[in-house]
Image (tube, rainbow, N blue to C red):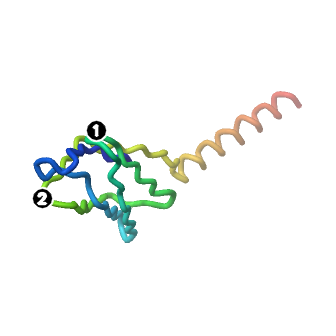
Amino acid sequence: MTLWHDDADGVGDISPPAAVTVTVGSRTQRFELSDPAGPAPFGSTLALGEGWQGAQMQLAIERFNNGLMLSEVTFVATPVPEPASALLLAMGLVALRSRRLRAQG
């Protein structure tokens, strides 16, 4: 997941987040964010790793001061096949193999 935010170097009390806490189901992970030099917008990538499952995701954003600007949140996930889909695929391959063996012999 990548959070894109603006940084005005404190002008107008706008700063990037100090930290982000991600909660999915019963799992929680906190990410400390660093403020790069300069006022340019930038992205912070939060790598959650494997095993995060749940119907909802909660982001708690901690700020340095009064102002915070997030322009975009990007999620990239790798779909995991359901066990039933893998079983159907395996059964289909077995059926094709047995059909081929019957046709040969």
Task: Say which quarter of the image contains residue 30.
Answer: bottom left
Task: Say which quarter of the image contains residue 32.
Answer: bottom left
Please rate how many residues cluster around mark 1, counting C-alpha atoms within 10 Å: few if below 14, some from 14 to 19, many from 20. Answer: few
Image quarter (top left, top right, bottom left or bottom right) of the C terminus? top right
Q: Secondary structure at mark 1?
A: loop
Q: In the picture shown, does residue 52 fall above or below 3?
A: below
Q: Which residue is mark 2?
A: 66
Q: CA distance from mark 2 to mark 1?
A: 19 Å
Q: Residue furthest top?
A: 103
Q: What residue is at 77 percent from the left and 38 percent from the top?
A: 98
Q: Earlier in the sequence, mark 2 or mark 1?
A: 1
**Residue 31 x/y as whole percent:** 38, 62
Residue 75 relative to residue 68: left or right: right
**Residue 2 x/y as whole percent:** 36, 46
Q: What residue is at 35 percent from the left and 63 percent from the top?
A: 24
Residue placed most toward the observer, 14 or 49: 14
Q: Which residue is mark 1?
A: 40
Q: What residue is at 34 percent from the left and 62 percent from the top?
A: 22
Q: What residue is at 14 percent from the left and 47 percent from the top?
A: 11
Q: Amino acid at mark 1?
A: Ala
